Amino acid sequence: GRRGGSGGYRGARWHTPEEARALFEGLPARNLTLSSAVALPTGGALARSVERVLPRGCLCGAFLLAAADAAG
C-alpha cells in the first residue's frame, strides 16, 4: 500500500503518524489528535475489545484519523 495500493486501495495514501502530523504543519490548526481503528471484517465485538486494550498512544490500527481545532 505504501506505493499507492491496488484494487479498492488503488491511489490510497498510507501515512505514518509522524507523516500525518507533518501534514498539519503551517496550517491554522491546534490540539491535533491522532486515533486509529482496528479493522477486522465482521470483527464486531472482537475489534472493539482490541481497540480498548491498546494504549491510546499506540497508533497501529488499519485506519488513522487526524483531527484538530481551527485556530482563529
Image (cartoon, rainbow, N blue to C red):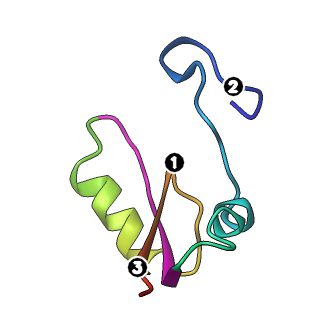
Image coords of residue 9 (percent x, y): 54, 23
Q: Nearer the viewer, residue 17 or 44?
A: 17
Residue 30 is one of the magenta-drawn residues: yes
Disc 1, SS: loop
Determine the image quadrant of residue 71: bottom left
Residues shaded magenta: 29-41
Q: Residue drawn 53% across and 78% down?
A: 28
Per the image, the residue denoted by label 1 is 62
Alpha carbons under labels 2 and 3: distance apart: 30 Å
Q: In the image, which disc is placed on residue 4? A: 2
Image coords of residue 52 (percent x, y): 36, 74
Residue 29 horizontal side relative to residue 49, left or right: right
Image coords of residue 7 (percent x, y): 54, 12
Q: Residue drawn 67% across and 50% down?
A: 15
Per the image, the residue denoted by label 3 is 70
Magenta stretch, overall SS: strand
- Local packing at callout 2 (Cα closer than 10 Å; few below 14, some 14-19, many 20+) is few
